[in-house]
Image: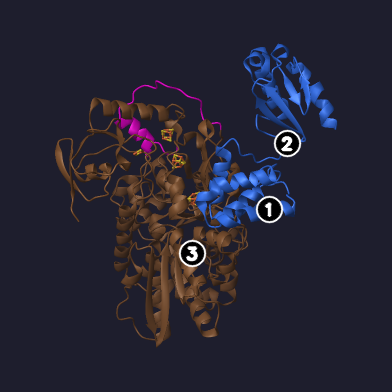
């Protein structure tokens, strides 16, 4: 393919045909400011912040949607360009609430940062504010249309990456608003609470529901025994809240930070991830042996669960009946752990630190009370934990590493990899192989199910039976697999995660989260796995003890009561 | 899902069948959305929720996008025409003599704006260009009756008569 030659700010640049001027400039180290643009996701040229001068063109061009052409001469830094960008930004700001001091996105807001970078020092225009009130109806997210700059990134993610289409621009002119159909509250819409919209929103127009107040209150209550669990994917991202590189494994510091915050016990969701493998693996083997509904599909991801409940209710029998690791943890904390520690379960308060906004919804599902109490009291996102640590003045990166408490803090590498797409599958295969064949796995890394490819498939030979497995992450990819299943393709076991990249790319993770950051966090997850002395769930001694002392056997009566659940067919509209 | 929403009215099965027939040639064609909505509105008179859902399913367009188009173009309406049709003249003379106050009053007392229908389904409101009775401004018509010098204090007594019918 022949390259295209152009000049940007006097520098000779070569670019592949089809490249935008913005990208070509970026490759040459020239930064052009952007606002609505989101690589490969939202390239619609609506905000006109990325204007540049193109010789021969009558007007300034939006560089994010202008393809390079041979011999093009581009200037990105002329007085006209700077002035036009500023003017466009001032107009965007003219109806924006001046609330930075009390805004959840302050210091992590693209609009705020852009205003600083473009040197806006006065508000020359003031327009009418949005007529729409904030929407608190969703258990996971808050919509604040007053802070919406109508960049449509959230809409692109929701429609294309997730194919949920819960929100779109409605009405027109000054009344334009990004909202569900009929301007219904988000909590009533067929939204799966994935928070991918919040992850890409440049402002605070969509953000997670802040529940840190409830956790501060529990920590301050002397009656409450407050235990915390940390999801696998949080250890490779929490450092980013404090300026660390994405993917740095900070497990020991995470534990130390949570102790400093005042949690009575610091446990690990990885423990119940291992337990999930025991239960779900047994379920798979049972369905294979007894002719149950196949393929079996994983059920760890609450956004995915709500998706199938709304859009493919006829496929619900394929779902594993296993609760997610978060919910298994809550149920055991208020039964097994309460008994062992001699604490009245009604005084135990369970907090989860999750990379996920849908976990808030899951924790609130009516049926999640197998312990006789609310299994999980509050699910916080990685971002909310970061805020609490800052508020407490904890300097995360300088903390000395500490160890999780036992028994619910003991885990294996198989539990850690739940944090990345393909991880549940790999963990299940490690265990299923050894349980079915009675032999030791020669190589316990299943690279075919790793990586950010949207749909991954492989076959594994278990004692002469071929197991066809598939992995999808991101709901557009999930749809593709479900269509294949409906079309009769033969699979035995499928892992589906709601968010692109799996939990490392969850809607509760630090902002920004993009493809490259996802890849680095995934690498961190596999590093953490390799560093674990045990890497197969069935070898977890605490899980073995749990079965011996309390549960009996996988899929037994107690498991059924505490660790398994049922689903609900929901309407699409 | 939305209860108590005025646009969620029950349609006759015959009307729904009609929408189905209209849509048939366009199945799976998202590009025909506006055209189909036009035809559906012509057939049914308005675009209630269930019609929008049918169109969404039939054309394979997300409901958010269907509603986005319906709420963007002022010629689409989600409410049936009211029993009685009010027109307020917005010609210059009437405007000067207080047509605007009249519209504000209608909004305030009957929650009804131009192109809209009152929640009880009694009245729909349109704004029209000069009706040729400039001397009598502000002028309002209700069905076939013309009223002149309708100042805001007269409004309720005029509409009361129709509301009873
Ligand atoms: S969204 Fe950004 S610019 Fe707007 S108030 Fe919040 S921090 Fe400030
Ligand atoms: S949470 Fe997910 S499904 Fe809901 S609006 Fe946001 S992107 Fe769409
Ligand atoms: S909610 Fe956020 S992402 Fe969506 S259009 Fe508004 S500013 Fe953009
Ligand atoms: S970033 Fe190019 S138009 Fe918004």
Which is nearer the N-term, disc 1 or disc 2? 1
Dot in front, 3 or 2: 2
Q: What x and y, as percent, mark residue A22?
A: 27, 42
Residue in the foreground of this view, choosing between B122 and A38 = B122
Q: Is residue A45 visible?
A: yes
Q: Which mark is residue A300?
A: 3
Dot in front, 1 or 2: 1
Q: How is the image coloured?
A: by chain
SS assignment at label 1: helix
Neighbourhood count class around disc 3 (C-alpha, 10 Å): few under 14, some 14–19, many 20 upward: many
Q: Chain of mark 3?
A: A
Q: What x and y, as percent, mark residue A249?
A: 31, 57
Quick one: which chain is brown? A
Locate residue A527: give its quadrant: bottom left
Disc 1 from disc 2: Cα separation: 26 Å
Q: Chain of mark 1?
A: B
Residue at screen point 36% across, 69% down: A449
Neighbourhood count class around disc 2 (C-alpha, 10 Å): few under 14, some 14–19, many 20 upward: some
Q: Chain of mark 2?
A: B
Q: Judge whether residue A221 is colored magenta.
A: no
Q: What x and y, as percent, mark residue B55?
A: 60, 52
Residue indicated by mark 2: B119
Quick one: which chain is blue? B
Q: What x and y, as percent, mark residue A525?
A: 33, 62
Give the extent of the magenta segment.
Answer: A104-131
SS assignment at label 2: loop
- The C terminus of chain B, quarter of image: top right
Residue in the foreground of this view, choosing between A306 and B71 = B71
Disc 1 from disc 3: Cα separation: 44 Å
SS assignment at label 3: loop
Residue indicated by mark 1: B18
Residue at screen point 75% across, 24% down: B141
């Amino acid at each position: 393919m022949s390259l295209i030659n152009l000049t940007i700010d006097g520098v000779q640049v070569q670019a592949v045909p089809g490249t935008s001027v913005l990208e070509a400039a970026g490759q040459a180290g020239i930064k052009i400011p952007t606002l609505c643009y989101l690589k490969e996701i939202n390239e619609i040229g609506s905000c006109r912040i990325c204007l540049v001068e193109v010789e021969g063109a009558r007007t300034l061009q939006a560089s994010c949607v202008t393809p390079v052409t041979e011999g093009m001469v581009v200037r990105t830094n002329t007085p006209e360009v700077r002035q036009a960008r500023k003017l466009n930004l001032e107009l965007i700001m003219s109806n924006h609430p001046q609330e930075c001091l009390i805004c959840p996105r302050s210091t992590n807001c693209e609009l705020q940062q852009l205003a600083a970078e473009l040197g806006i020092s006065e508000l020359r225009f003031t327009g009418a504010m949005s007529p729409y009130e904030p929407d608190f109806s969703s258990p996971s997210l808050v919509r604040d249309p007053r802070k919406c700059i109508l960049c449509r990134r959230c809409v692109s993610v929701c429609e294309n990456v997730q194919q949920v289409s819960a929100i779109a621009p409605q009405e027109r002119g000054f009344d334009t608003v990004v909202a569900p159909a009929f301007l219904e509250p988000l909590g009533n819409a067929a939204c799966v609470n994935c928070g991918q919209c919040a992850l890409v929103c440049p402002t605070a127009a969509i953000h997670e529901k802040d529940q840190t107040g409830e956790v501060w209150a529990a920590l301050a209550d002397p009656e409450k025994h407050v235990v915390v669990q940390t999801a696998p994917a949080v250890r490779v991202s929490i450092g980013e809240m404090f300026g660390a590189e994405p993917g740095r494994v900070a497990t020991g510091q995470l534990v130390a930070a949570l102790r400093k915050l005042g949690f009575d016990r610091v446990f690990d969701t990885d423990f119940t991830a291992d337990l999930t493998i025991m239960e779900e693996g047994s379920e798979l083997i049972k369905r294979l042996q007894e002719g149950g509904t196949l393929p079996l599909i994983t059920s760890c991801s609450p956004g995915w669960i709500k998706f199938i409940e709304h859009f493919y209710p006829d496929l619900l029998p394929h779902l594993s009946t296993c609760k997610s690791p978060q919910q298994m943890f809550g149920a055991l904390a208020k039964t097994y752990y309460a008994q062992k520690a001699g604490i009245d379960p009604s005084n135990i308060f369970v907090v989860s630190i999750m990379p996920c906004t849908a976990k808030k919804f899951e924790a609130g599902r009516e049926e999640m009370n197998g312990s006789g109490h609310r299994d999980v009291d509050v699910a916080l996102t990685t971002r909310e934990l970061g805020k609490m640590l800052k508020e407490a003045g904890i300097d995360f990166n300088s903390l000395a590493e500490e160890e999780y408490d036992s028994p619910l803090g003991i885990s294996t590498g198989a539990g850690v990899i739940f944090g990345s797409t393909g991880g549940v599958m790999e963990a299940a295969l490690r265990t299923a192989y050894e349980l079915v064949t009675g032999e030791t796995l020669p190589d316990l890394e299943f690279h075919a199910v790793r990586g950010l490819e949207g749909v991954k498939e492989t076959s594994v030979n278990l004692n002469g039976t071929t197991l066809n497995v598939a992995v999808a992450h991101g709901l557009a990819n999930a749809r593709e697999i479900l269509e294949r299943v409906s079309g009769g393709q033969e699979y035995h076991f499928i892992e589906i995660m709601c968010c692109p990249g799996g939990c490392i790319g969850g809607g509760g993770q630090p902002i920004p989260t993009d493809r490259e950051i996802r890849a680095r966090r995934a690498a961190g997850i596999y590093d953490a796995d390799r560093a674990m002395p045990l890497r197969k769930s069935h070898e977890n001694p605490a899980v073995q003890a749990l079965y011996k002392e309390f549960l009996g056997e996988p899929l037994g009566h107690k498991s059924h009561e505490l660790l398994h659940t049922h689903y609900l067919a929901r309407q699409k509209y | 899902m939305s209860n108590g929403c005025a646009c969620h009215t029950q349609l006759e099965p015959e009307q729904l069948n009609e929408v189905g027939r209209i849509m048939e040639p366009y199945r799976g064609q998202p590009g025909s959305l506006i055209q189909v909505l036009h035809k559906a509105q012509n057939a049914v008179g308005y675009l209630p929720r269930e019609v929008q859902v049918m169109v969404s399913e039939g054309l394979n367009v997300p409901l958010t996008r269907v509603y986005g188009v319906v709420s963007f173009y002022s010629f689409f309406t989600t409410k049936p025409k009211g029993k009685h049709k009010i027109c307020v003249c917005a010609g210059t003379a009437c405007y000067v003599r207080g047509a605007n106050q009249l519209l504000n009053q209608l909004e305030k007392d009957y929650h009804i704006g131009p192109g809209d229908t009152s929640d009880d389904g009694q009245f729909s409101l349109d704004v029209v260009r000069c009706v040729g009775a400039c001397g009598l401004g502000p002028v309002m018509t209700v069905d076939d009756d013309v009223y002149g010098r309708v100042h805001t204090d007269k409004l309720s007594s005029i509409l009361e008569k129709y509301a009873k019918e």
